Image: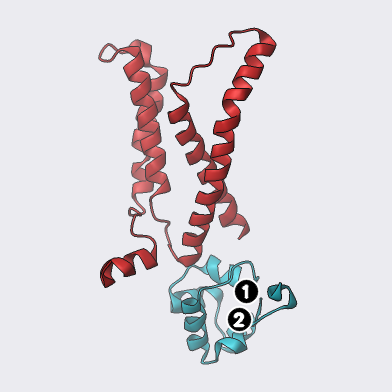
Chain colours: A red, B cyan
Amino acid sequence: MNDKQLNKVRKGDFLLLPHYMKWAAIYPVLCGVVLFFFKEHQQFLNEEVATGMAGHLILLGFLLIIISRDKFPDERLLILRHKAMAYAFIHGMILVIVTPFLTFLLGSLFRSGTQLDFTDYGMLSIFLFQIMYLINYWRFKQEL
Amino acid sequence: MKNTIHVHRAIHKMTQADLSEAIGVSRQTINSIEKSRYVPSTILALKIARTFKVTVEELFELEDSDDR
């Protein structure tokens, strides 16, 4: 690693996008939500593809929000960002581990189909991670 | 860790916003440091000390709880 790369890593915000990208992130989220709720009313994509695309657009939007700089970025916010990331990882993992068991348990209780479908857990786990990160980051900014 | 930043700010008649502008951080960061919720990096501590023309030890002091 040369001095320039080392300096970038030490500064810690080299992966972050400019602040205005937070606002640009509204568009993919909005498109994703609209596509998800109106997938039956469009003729261009079949329903499965539309659902998948809507999910990915929403994930992309949240990712843009997460990796955009704050208005006044400094070392405190960078540390809070890292803490929120660590907390979100643990919370997200717990939710991902617990969710299939809860689905199975509730399914068994109400006898409404105990078959587990793991196809969407990848997308769901990333979404949970993103939401947990945003909640933790907001909470840390208020409290610390 | 205790600190006397608010005292030095008062001596120099500086607001939190003035100090934050002088050292290039947000006003919320200065507020967090003053309330001991956030411990600044060495670089930031040195910058604050340089602004007030004092040593870092005059600004920050370890507490008993920090020894644990």
Same chain assignment for discs 2 and 1: yes
Residue corresponding to mark 1: B34
Q: Which mark is residue B11?
A: none
Query: Where does the image place residue B56, in percent across and percent down from the top left?
Result: 56, 86
Quarter of the picture containing the N terminus of chain B is bottom right
> Does residue B18 show up?
no
The label number, if any, that marks residue B5 in the structure image: 2
Q: Is residue B51 visible?
A: yes
Q: Residue at x 26, y 69 (%)?
A: A2
In the rendered view, would you say A37 is above or below A129? above
Pointers 2 and 1 in contact (C-beta within 8 Å):
yes
Which sits in the foreground, A19 or A118? A118
Q: Where is residue B13, by image quadrant? A: bottom right
Which residue occupies 39% across, 49% down? A67
- Residue found farthest to the front: A1
Q: Dividing the picture into quarters, in which one does residue A61 lie?
A: top left
Q: Nearer the viewer, residue A34 or A64?
A: A64
Left-right relation of A11 to B35: left
